[in-house]
Amino acid sequence: MTNNNIQQDKPLLVAGIGGSAGAFEAVRELVSHLTSQNGIAYVYLQHQPADFDSQMVPLLAKKTKVPVLVAEEGMEVQPDVFYIVPPGKELTLKEGLFRLAKRASEGYDHMPINRLFSSVADAYKELAIGVVLSGADGDGAQGLKAIKAAGGLSFAQDASAQFQSMPQTAIAIDAVDLVLSPKEIAEELNSLGRQKDFYFSALQDPSGELLSNKDKDLIIILQMVQKATSVDFGQYKMSTIKRRIIRRILLHKLNTLQDYVQYMRAHPAETQQLFNDLLINVTHFFRDKETTEYLKNKLFPEIIAAKQHNEPIRIWVPACSSGQEVYSIAIILIEVLGEHHGTHPIQIFASDLSETAIHKARLGMYSTDEITGISPKRLQRFFTKVDGQFRINKSIRDLCVFATQNITLDPPFSRLDLVSCCNFLIYIDNNLQQKIMSTFHYALNNNGYLVLGKSETVGSSAYLFSQVDKKVKVFAKKKDTPAKALFPMSYLLPVGHRVQAITKQKTVAASRNDDQDLEKAVDTLLLKKFTPASVVINHDMDIVQFRGSTGIFLEPTPGKASLNLLKMARPGLAFELRNTVHKAIKSGEAVKKSDLELTYNDKVMRINVEVVPIKSELEESYFLVAFSESGLPPEVELSALKDHRVKQLETELSALREDMRSIVEEQEASVEELQSANEEIVSANEELQSINEELETSKEEVESSNEELITINQELQLRNEQLTESQDYAQAVFSTIREALLILDRNLRVKLANFQFYRMFQLREEHTEGRMLYELNSRQWDIPELRQLLEEKLPGNAYIHGLEITHNFAGIGEKTLVINARRIVQRIHSDQLTLLALEDITEHRRAQQIIADRELWFRNLADNAPVMIWVTDKDKKATFFNKAWLEFRSDTMEEALVKGWMDDVHPEDRPRLKKLFDDCFQEKLPFELKYRVLYHDTEYKLLHNKAKPNFSPEGQFLGYIGSCVVIQEINAA
């Protein structure tokens, strides 16, 4: 269905609906509130893998009276049906039929909702509707923007969305008309269904192309917009203007233009909203591939070759929107210059009416779906990823100067090599197109070029430009045509003083073609009153049209060609024509001169001349000069002929005296005016001298301020270098630290992760950054302990240390992690980040468990041995006694470890034992000896003790381990 379908008997509203994570609950609520007979066709696409067993059709069918069907290839779109796109498929619409295709692989181009919305916008124009529901990525935002640019309506889910990323991305790029809950969106759709008859009839209104007297409310609306914004839309195509206004009427549930006028008066902010709607900001990177290739391979090399060394290349991109076309041209030019980039300074000027668009263009920050179509090589070379978005590198941004500008009023940039104005002329009428073409011609160098959009042409300005290649819309400036452009003096005034009321005459004139109106007015006048030869002249007496055969009265003069009436008049006729025209101009009424003599082909003729002002609604004054013959003079006597000649001369003399008197009066009045003007000039000169003195003072202040700014700039540069070094240092630490690191935003979405994180958990960057932490790897990270840390503990503490969790991750197995978390408050950006450090201690815990198991095994073995076993550390301090030793000494383990055993050795054996013990510890040698030890504090028994040093696998001395047995009982001393 193309735009022509709006003219059919049964137009169709089509609503594209898109969602991802968390969208099922939202769409279920939406369909449950839809009425069954509102005349809208619904197409719903949700991100689902191809092998997903979807039960969406039966589940939604239970909630709504609207039939729910799976969309199939070639199926015709019908109203009051809710179609669901099958899992793993992409859907577009063509000629009212569904076209299904296998969904593209994941990546930057993986945006099936964008493609659905864009196809709805292309096919149904103003009848398109877009709805974005819950989702964890940015899909759908650019598609909504396309629907809004086509004149359709767009909605996004409010804070009720479980995942905010998709709705918020669309809202951030100003692609959404209303932000509502699913229930409220359904109510809006029902309301549109009730208003569809008004909508269809308004779109078919034939008066949309012309501002007629009955459109007084439309004139008032345009006056209000001009007063608020200083922009006159009177010469834009009224069909587009009216459709945009009708769109706003529908959004506010109004019925007529008059209702909308009242609404605008009651809600002043609506004027700016309408202004934003009238500015159609639609653009893409490298939008026209053929033109891109022509610029790169043909045009830019020619421009560069014609330049002298260090001669700048100057380019202007009017109506630049949010800057994608500007940066595309800059990138192409840099690629063409290559290593010779420094030989030619690049100056790219970009302008637009929208301050919002200019602000975004200056920032140079674009979302993932806005950079679709850019090759990975260009993306890597010219863009930097920042907070999940892509920013044009500073080296490219520095080449481009962005400014708000009204190209219909403000002077252009000058000495340009190229003007690129794509898809702007299609929105304005022929007269304004001609004016803008003259402006472009004036701004370009003699060897300059003009680039237009695919559907645009120079039209009636072909005398200014010639097309250089039939395959692309690139035009060369014609050098032999004088360059001139007219700008109203109001551009010299502050913006607030430029606003002028839109008069009925101006608005009507702006909506018509001057040539057609002029021709119509002349034809009407001739048919009513005249049949003789005539010409139409302007206020300067230049002929703009011929009627009939004027050869008897007018002829071209030798020399330079001229269409001036007086220069073309035959001898003897110029004087009378001048007087007659002047009287008509002065009086504003028809003036007739009769019985004038004219010599033609050696014969004397009598003619009549009448000058009549042309009454029309055009701004410039025109006059009709009609000639008629009185016939040849009859044969008369010579005396009578002389009398007639005398009488004629007397009449001419009387007329000359009258003219002379009139000229003298006019001259005296002019002298008085000149005297008054001279006094004003003298006064103005004195004021200018005073202003000059003030300017000199201001200049000194500016120079002083400039020196301060230079100092501040140097300090800023130093701070910037320090900041860059700090950022590089932080990035190096972040990248090389062995722990896995994550940075989360306020909504717990991943802003950044280091290499160790991706390696440890086997994730990819494009599937991680920008997504909520809990959603990663099919919600593997939705861990209760982690939720408690981030949502309950951390908000009340700046730092949480040593949280240990164990979790089984699909594909990599069970992991034991120690998590440290810190809140980072960015006061400048009013933002809050969370830094998570994840240390994998899985192997450490396993080793600890093995050691614990082995120690338990050793203790069990030692306690069940028939000998007494002891262990010391490298400092001779006892660390273990087995059960047999403790029973021999009647001690507990704690008592035995505290008091040791040397004091219980027989006094006679103690010196020998101590010396041997010290010597062996010093040399780390095994030893064996016998000595007497007190048993149960009552008697001594002879023990045989064997010991050997204990070493670690690395050879480090750890102490001794020994065993004792009783070999003889000795009576207590």
Image (cartoon, helix red, strand yellow):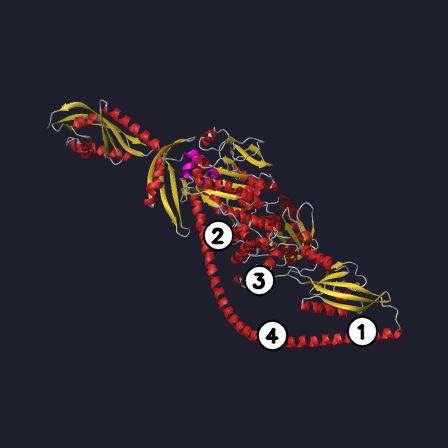
Whole-number angstrom distance, CA of label 1 to CA of label 3: 54 Å
**Circle nearer the N terminus (1, 2):** 2
Mark 4 falls on what kind of element? helix
Please, what is the three-letter code of the amino acid marked with disc 2? Answer: Tyr
Q: Which residue is mark 3?
A: 491
> Which of the two marks, 2 or 4, is nearer to us in this view?
2
Residue with the most extreme left position: 973
**Circle nearer the N terminus (4, 1):** 1
For label 3, count other residues whose C-alpha is less than 10 Å away and answer few (under 14), some (14-19) or many (20+): some
For label 4, count other residues whose C-alpha is less than 10 Å away and answer few (under 14), some (14-19) or many (20+): few
Whole-number angstrom distance, CA of label 1 to CA of label 2: 70 Å
Mark 2 falls on what kind of element? helix
Q: Which residues are magenta?
A: 761-780
**Circle nearer the N terminus (2, 4):** 2
Whole-number angstrom distance, CA of label 2 to CA of label 4: 48 Å
Report whether residue 859 is seen: yes
Judged left or right of residue 567, residue 303 is: left
Residue 184 place in picture, x, y as percent: 44, 41
Residue 864 place in picture, x, y as percent: 23, 23
Would you identify the image quadrant in which residue 807 lies? top left
Please, what is the three-letter code of the amino acid marked with disc 3? Answer: Tyr
Magenta includes 743? Answer: no
In this rendering, the answer to whether 438 lies above or below 835 is below
* 839 or 902: nearer the viewer: 839
Q: Quadrant of the N terminus?
A: top right
Whole-number angstrom distance, CA of label 4 to CA of label 1: 42 Å
* 494 or 311: nearer the viewer: 494
Q: Which residue is mark 2?
A: 263
Please, what is the three-letter code of the amino acid marked with disc 4? Answer: Ala
Q: Which mark is residue 677?
A: 4
Q: Which residue is mark 1?
A: 648
